Amino acid sequence: MKIRSISNMCFALAVIVLVVSACSLLSGSSPTATFKKFFEASKKKDVAGIRKTLSKGSLEMFDKIAKEQNKTTDDMLKDVDKDSKSEAMPETRNEKIDGDSATLEVKNEKTGKWDSLPFVKENGEWKIALDKFIENMLKDLQTK
């Protein structure tokens, strides 16, 4: 009787683990999926949706910039893609994951070049690290 009970508990636990694993795989949590969510939210000017895709560091950066410009962070986020004329999502390639960091190459519609967009994993979700992107751009400018 005890063996059957233990066996049923083990089976139930295995099913729970399998369901949780399948859900995380089906959720599409990847840097590419996060970028798609960001693009769709920015086109709709969906501030809550944009916030969900950005890293904590990126949001803090937007808070700081907004304060300096006497704007709200939400106003800044609504204008995040105001210079983009394209309705189509940019091409992406070469997603690379290294632990809790990742990069995704995104084709710049203005220059035709590929920009490497950094991501960080926060609370199990991939977030766009625009703060790191800007840091990298500044470093590149200083070395040229």
Image: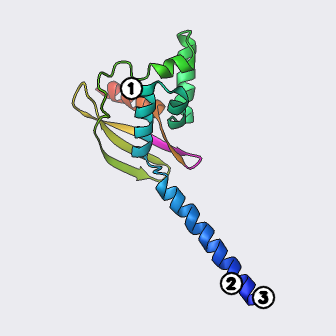
Label 1 Cα neighbours within 10 Å, binned few <14 / some 14-19 / many ≥20: few
Whether residues under marks 2 and 1 lie with C-beta atoms below 8 angstroms apart, the answer is no
- Residue 98 colored magenta? no
Query: Where does residue 53 sit, x and y in percent of width and height?
Result: 50, 37
- Residue at point 29%, 21% (across, down): 85
- Determine whether the residue tagged by mark 1 lies in a helix, strand or loop: helix
User: In this rendering, which labeled residue sits more in front, label 1 or label 3?
Assistant: 3
- The quarter of the rendered structure image containing the C terminus is top left
- The quarter of the rendered structure image containing the N terminus is bottom right
Whether residues under marks 1 and 3 lie with C-beta atoms below 8 angstroms apart, the answer is no
- Residue at point 25%, 24% (across, down): 110
Q: CA distance from mark 2 to mark 1?
A: 59 Å
- Determine whether the residue tagged by mark 3 lies in a helix, strand or loop: helix
The residue labelled by disc 1 is: 138
Q: Amino acid at mark 1?
A: Leu
Task: Check residue 2 in the rendering and tell me which mark sits there, or answer none.
Answer: 3
Q: Which residues are magenta?
A: 119-124
Query: Where does residue 8 sit, x and y in percent of width and height?
Result: 69, 80
Residue farthest along the left direction in this orientation: 112
Say which label, 1 or 3, has the lower sequence index: 3
Nearest the viewer among 61 and 143 is: 61
Q: Say above or below: 77 vs 68.
A: below
The residue labelled by disc 2 is: 7
Q: Main secondary structure of the magenta part?
A: strand
Q: Amino acid at mark 3?
A: Lys
Q: Is residue 125 left or right of residue 136?
A: right
Label 3 Cα neighbours within 10 Å, binned few <14 / some 14-19 / many ≥20: few
Say which label, 2 or 1, has the lower sequence index: 2
Residue farthest along the right direction in this orientation: 2
Q: Is residue 118 left or right of residue 68?
A: left
